[in-house]
Image (cartoon, helix red, strand yellow):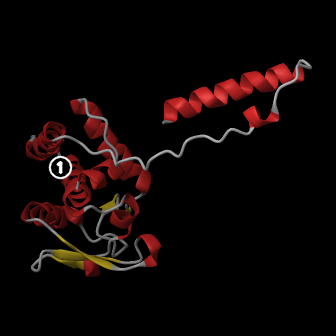
Amino acid sequence: VSTINNHLRSFQAGLRYLQEQDYLVPQVLLRLPGLKEPDRLPRFLTDEQMHRLRADLEGRVTENLSAAKRRDALLDRAVFYLMWQGGLRLGEVEELRLDDLDLSGAKLTVRQGKGRKDRTVFLTGTAVRAVQAFLAVRGLGGSDHLFLYRNRALRKDLAYNRIKAAGQRVGVKVSPHRLRHTC
């Protein structure tokens, strides 16, 4: 459908050019409507791509790193699991507070998500363990945000770029929203 619509737009552009050159062009040809395009399906990652990403993020946690780099690797892994297995949006991860967590109940509350609605998200055991591992090295910081980077609340650009960098390391085109679609 999109190819046909592109051909129709090109055809009409050619007709408008002829019209500018003082050729008579029937107006009905310039008013032909395009075809209705179907809704696009969300793009998700394959099992093999997810395996590569997961292996990279898990491997970075177990590498012999400095304390700061290990903390960053634990942050990346926890964000990854919340987006992939919890289906959280990037902004929702950024806004999570410590009070929103109920790790013993394996759930968290997303406050004022899309449409300004609150919702409860149930977590997998893997996601719970990843968040717990990050909390062990999180530190106090000056905020009650779950994720802190250099003692300040996590910024979207940081999480986005780190997820994208993990994908580049393993040759997978990934974004936070694509992880949500994969969930």
- Give above or below for 93 relative to 181: below
Horizontally, is 159 left or right of 183 in the view? Answer: right
Q: Nearer the viewer, residue 4 or 127?
A: 4
- The picture places residue 50, in percent across and down from the top left corner, at 17, 42
- Residue occupying the point 36% across, 66% down: 92
Horizontally, is 37 left or right of 183 in the view? Answer: right
Label total for image:
1
Q: Nearer the viewer, residue 66 or 20?
A: 20
Q: Amino acid at mark 1?
A: Arg
- The picture places residue 157, in percent across and down from the top left corner, at 43, 50
Looking at the figure, which quarter contains the C terminus? bottom left
Does any portion of residue 65 appear in the rendered image?
Answer: no
- Residue occupying the point 18% across, 37% down: 49
Horizontally, is 22 left or right of 97 in the view? Answer: right
- The picture places residue 58, in percent across and down from the top left corner, at 11, 46
Label 1: which residue?
Answer: 70
- Residue occupying the point 45% across, 77% down: 116
Does any portion of residue 150 appear in the rendered image?
Answer: yes
- Residue occupying the point 40% across, 47% down: 40
- The picture places residue 145, in percent across and down from the top left corner, at 34, 71
Horizontally, is 9 left or right of 19 in the view? Answer: left
Task: Assign a secondary structure to mark 1.
Answer: helix
Residue 128: name its quadrant.
Answer: bottom left
